[in-house]
Image (cartoon, grey):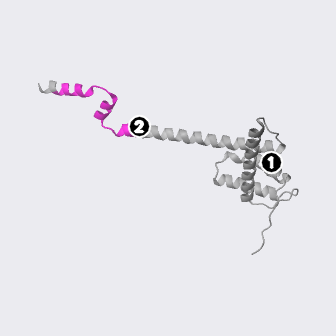
Amino acid sequence: MLPRTVMEWTKQHDKALLGEMTISDLFQYKKGTPERGQLWDSIAGNLNAMDYPKFKVAKRSCRDRWTLLRTKYKRRMSEEIQATGIDAEVGELDEIIEDLIGKEDAAIDSDKEGKKKAEADKKAAEEIRIKAMERFGNTRKRGGEDGEEGAKNKKKEKWQ
């Protein structure tokens, strides 16, 4: 088995990765979709094509690095806020990470809103279907109309 070459991530590498992620508008697609996978492929390809800093990455390593950067950033910010009670110093990379996290959260929120709307539409359609399948008499009963008594009176008048 051949030894795998492991790339060392530096700040320059991180900056290039975050720049490519910003340009590609990665979070417009839902996580796990083929379109998002294609964007990760294109990000990895663009990074590997760069002369400086030199990259040797796959889409998986780019995704893993983004997850690591996001996790470290969130942990560091929460620790600094708890320790000092004031906003922490934010560097250039931190600003880019914060912007990307905001885009990712906005995409997740809009997806949740879409699911809630779809669920509400499904419930409304189910109610309409149930109403359509009811008999006319049951519909009157549910509606609270006194149509039953009126129908009985008409039958009595008819026979008398």
The quadrant of the image that shows the N terminus is bottom right
Quick check: is 149 in the magenta stretch? yes
Query: Going 51% across and 41% down the picture, which residue do you hit?
Result: 119
The one of 101 and 51 positioned closer to us in this rendering:
101
Q: Earlier in the sequence, mark 2 or mark 1?
A: 1
Q: At which x and y percent is residue 73?
A: 76, 46
Q: Quadrant of residue 126?
A: top left
- Boundaries of the magenta span: 129-155
The quadrant of the image that shows the C terminus is top left
Q: Secondary structure at mark 1?
A: helix
**Residue lying farthest to the left in this orientation:** 160
Q: At which x and y percent is residue 85?
A: 76, 35
Asked if residue 64 is positioned above or below residue 80 in the image, the reply reads: below
Q: At which x and y percent is residue 30?
A: 64, 48
The amino acid at mark 1 is Gly
Q: Would you say the magenta stretch is mainly helix, strand or loop? A: helix
The amino acid at mark 2 is Ile
147 on left or right of 130: left
Quick check: is 63 in the magenta stretch? no
Q: Quadrant of residue 59?
A: bottom right
Asked if residue 56 is positioned above or below residue 76 in the image, the reply reads: below
Task: Write down the residue under mark 1.
Answer: 19
Query: Going 31% across and 30% down the picture, which residue do you hit?
Result: 140
Query: Going 61% across and 43% down the picture, which residue do you hit?
Result: 111
26 on left or right of 160: right
The one of 84 and 153 positioned closer to us in this rendering:
84
Circles 2 and 1, Cβ within 8 Å, touching? The answer is no
- Identify the disc placed on residue 44: none
Q: Quadrant of residue 46?
A: bottom right
Task: Write down the residue under mark 2.
Answer: 128
